[in-house]
Image (cartoon, grey):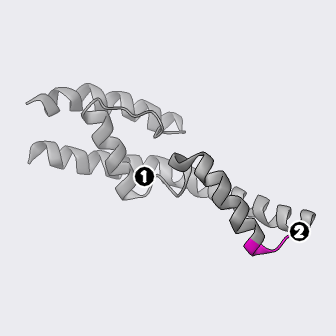
């Protein structure tokens, strides 16, 4: 119960620290998408095909990561020391919280 509560709190903090940065990144990507469609005069359908091909090249970066479910997944990988590496915070606050979260959480996970 204590470990699960710790995971929920950690996920909420990671969500709060990282989601706004990720939202801004997605907005910038959407602006680039519109610019590419206009610049190269391609249809939205053709762009989706191209996007699918690129996502298959890097599947772990597809979709938003820092919603609560993704943040919970990240908190679990930190706590269990799995640390897959494809899921990492971008903000200084997120990186600092990861260190503090791991220092307390890893021993808690061993109990």
Q: Please identify the quarter of the rendering in which residue 67 is found.
A: bottom left
Q: Position of residue 51 (x, y in %)?
A: 68, 60
Q: Main secondary structure of the magenta part?
A: loop
Q: With 36 as the anchor, is 111 left or right in this view?
A: left
Foreground: 31 or 15? 31
Q: Position of residue 16 (x, y in %)?
A: 43, 52
Foreground: 102 or 38? 38
At horizontal 91% and vertical 69% (from top left) the residue drawn is 41
Say which label, 1 or 2, has the lower sequence index: 1
Tell whether label 2 touches label 1 (CB within 8 Å): no
Instruction: List the residue tagged with mark 1.
Output: 16
Instruction: List the residue tagged with mark 2.
Output: 38
Name the quadrant of the C terminus: top left
The image shows residue 54, relative to residue 77, as above or below, that is below
At horizontal 36% and vertical 27% (from top left) the residue drawn is 99
Q: Secondary structure at mark 1?
A: helix
Residue 42 within the magenta-colored segment of the rendering: yes
Q: Secondary structure at mark 2?
A: helix
Residue 28 within the magenta-colored segment of the rendering: no
Q: Position of residue 82 (x, y in %)?
A: 31, 32
Q: With 59 as the anchor, is 35 left or right in this view?
A: right
Q: Report the label total.
A: 2
Q: CA distance from mark 1 to mark 2?
A: 34 Å
The image shows residue 97, relative to residue 51, as above or below, that is above
Residue stretch in magenta: 41-45
Q: Position of residue 90 (x, y in %)?
A: 54, 39
At horizontal 56% and vertical 52% (from top left) the residue drawn is 22
């Amino acid at each position: 119960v204590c470990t699960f509560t710790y995971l929920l709190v950690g996920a909420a903090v990671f969500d709060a620290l990282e989601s706004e940065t990720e939202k801004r990144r997605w907005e910038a990507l959407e602006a680039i998408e519109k610019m590419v469609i206009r610049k190269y005069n391609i249809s939205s359908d053709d762009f989706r095909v191209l996007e699918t091909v690129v996502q298959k090249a890097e599947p772990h970066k597809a979709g938003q990561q820092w919603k609560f479910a993704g943040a919970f997944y990240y908190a679990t990988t930190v706590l269990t020391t799995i640390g897959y590496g494809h899921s990492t915070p971008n903000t200084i606050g997120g990186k600092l919280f990861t260190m503090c979260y791991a220092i307390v959480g890893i021993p808690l996970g061993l109990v």
